[in-house]
Amino acid sequence: MSDTREQDYQARIAIYPRSVKGRFRTLKWGILALAYAVYFLLPWVRWHRDYGAAQAVLFDIPGRRFYLFDLIVYPQDIFWLAGFLMIAAMLLFLVTGLAGRVFCGYFCFQTLWTDVYMLFERLVQGERPARIRLSKQPWGAEKILKLGATHALWLLTAFATGLTFTLYWADAPTLFKEIFTGQAPFPAYATTVFLTVTTYVMAGLAREQVCTYMCPYARFQSVMFDRDTLIVSYDDKRGEGSAGRAKVAAGLKTREERQAKGVGDCIDCGYCVQVCPTGIDIRNGLQYQCIHCALCVDACDTIMDKMNWPRGLIRYTSENALEGKPTRLLKLKNIGYGVALAIMVVLLAWSILTQPQLDASVAQVRQPLFVQLSDGAIQNSYEIKINNKTQQTVALRIELHGLEGAELDTGRIDVVHLTPEHSTRVLARVRYHVSDPSVHQREILFRVVPLDNEDLSVLELPSHFYSR
């Protein structure tokens, strides 16, 4: 039983990634800086509106609307979210089919926050050898001080992350002040604490285990790969030769000497393994733990430059290219992803750009479906909901068409005055003296007519009148 448990479960082996410089590391820093700037600064960006919040991006749950710059999203526009998620999924499929897990390596929140956490770790504890020595040395003042400072920076970053996320859901300056004066509502504190803890655990303590064990994308990514997908790969033929890899030694210092003896270009320095954030050896082939961050490419290129040998021993390439075959990126699968993605983007953009500034819906009250009055007339009741998406108050009149001789009763509401970004419900009763008892259902049309705004269109709401 103990042998089985030892095979099934293994304690985490700490990984101490080494820093590296290169084009992909520079690209990752650039993306990280942009992502952090957008995330942490966006809640503080002010935005002028004639009516409503003065915050550029605000998710107003009590007001049941989301502010995204000049776009205001209402509950009835929730299908936009479905469209956005479909676009994101299709984009992920397309990018994965073309270039593997580049999303994981460059854009994933887990990667972006883990990179910053590892940066703090290096700044406080030193480079890889120093961190390894620190972990092995007995507890003392130096170890407590350095580890304490590291975790303090991690917690500070995690708290800033949680607090910033919370600020998206209310007026940022106001909520920020309320949080630090103890006046914020409980959900604000709960959300901040929850995200502080999860960020600290995921980016600081779990790290590569999130990518390896928790993220489902690591498990099904290979389904979207093919032999033309660009992935981070080790050129086994060049690196191993016929005699395998070997360190630089007497008689093995130049490419000519190594090739004469059948030795490959890989000098077995281990740099590519040391910089890997998930601790794998790319020379063993494609592995599900690889997030395609290409730091091993930078590491290998650095060594090749020092040796004055050609770059590309580790590079973005395809299995077909490694075998000397042509790589075809414009395949039917990728073209299909691209076409579907373009259609979805166009449809979503069209829906947003053509959204009506005023919308309404009608629902018939069905309990009871109709009522017969004392004078013999039949009465049906309807609930008309009107939403004002404009930045000004509108005056509206409700009219009834399609049922000659019918009477429309909206109570004391002759004209509906609706303030900006608000909705209202109007109970409308239709009374009609039925002339032909054999007809039980008649088509009617409610018209919502703007009275003082020529830019708004008349809304037509079809419904039915029932007499039995």
Image: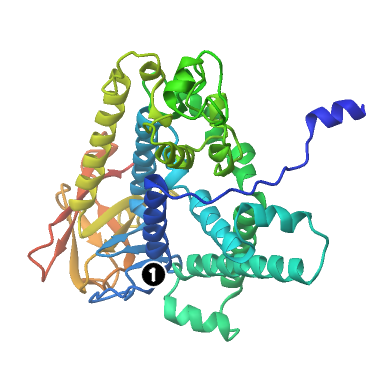
**Residue at the spot 31% in from the left edge and 28% down from the top edge:** 337
Give the side of residue 3 with respect to residue 378, left or right: right
- Front one among 369 and 7: 7
Color style of the picture: rainbow
Instruction: State the residue in front, 74 or 380.
Output: 74
Q: Which residue type carries mark 1? A: Leu
Q: Position of residue 173 (x, y in %)?
A: 43, 80
Quarter of the N terminus within the rendering = top right
Label 1: element kind: helix
Name which residue lies at 56% across and 67% down.
157
Q: Is residue 267 left or right of residue 383?
A: right
Quadrant location of residue 58?
A: bottom left
Q: Which residue is mark 1?
A: 41
Left or right position of 244 against 467: right
* Quarter of the view holding residue 416: bottom left
Name the residue at 38% across, 53% down: 31
**Vertical order, 93 against 127 (above or below):** above
User: Which residue corresponds to the image point at 33% horizontal and 54% vertical from the top-left?
Assistant: 382
Asked whether residue 209 appears in the rendered view, the answer is yes
Please, is residue 100 above or below residue 355 in the view? above
- Residue 262: percent from the left, percent from the top? 50, 15
The picture places residue 468, in percent across and down from the top left corner, at 35, 40
